[in-house]
Image (cartoon, rainbow, N blue to C red):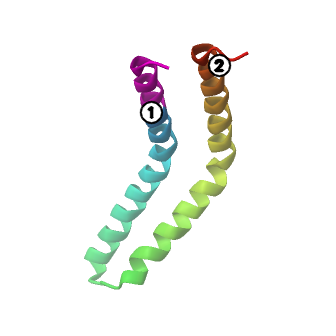
Amino acid sequence: MDTTTAISLSRAVLLEALLIAAPILGVSLVVGIGVALFQALTSLQEQTVAMIPKLLALAGTLFFLMPWILKQFVEFTQRTLVSLARYGGGG
């Protein structure tokens, strides 16, 4: 495997990680902004009020997105193994 292949594979890994993390981070961002706005409007500055809705939202997001995430992982693994066999000269 030459450096071009290694760079290409590294780029593919980073893009796949970004694709999988984006919906989860997006939900966390939206819930965090909503909770911060609620806390600012009510002057309620309790840390647990900020943490519990985020944890529940992330758990729900992971629950609903898990089939898609697993599908992405399996497809990426298949593509990577085929590409490694092609570049590595494996049979």
Q: Which mark is residue 15?
A: 1
| 43 drawn magenta | no
Residue 26 is left or right of residue 85, and the answer is: left
Residue 70 is left or right of residue 19, and the answer is: right
State the residue at coordinates (48%, 27%): 9
What's the magenta bit mostly, secondary-structure-wise? helix
Is 24 in front, or is 46?
24
Q: Is residue 22 above or below residue 50?
A: above
State the residue at coordinates (44%, 22%): 8
| 4 drawn magenta | yes
Is 91 in front, or is 64?
91
Q: Is residue 45 above or below residue 27?
A: below
Residue type at numbered disc 1: Leu
Residue type at numbered disc 2: Ala
Q: Position of residue 85 (x, y in %)?
A: 65, 19
Q: Residue furthest right?
A: 91
Is 67 in front, or is 37?
67
Q: Which mark is residue 48?
A: none
Mark 1 and 2 residues: CB-CB less than 8 Å, in contact?
no
State the residue at coordinates (68%, 17%): 90
Q: Position of residue 26 (x, y in %)?
A: 42, 50
- Label 1 vs label 2: CA separation? 21 Å
State the residue at coordinates (57%, 55%): 61
Q: Which residue is mark 2?
A: 85
Kind of element beneath mark 1: helix
The span shown in magenta is 1-12
Q: Is residue 9 above or below residue 50?
A: above
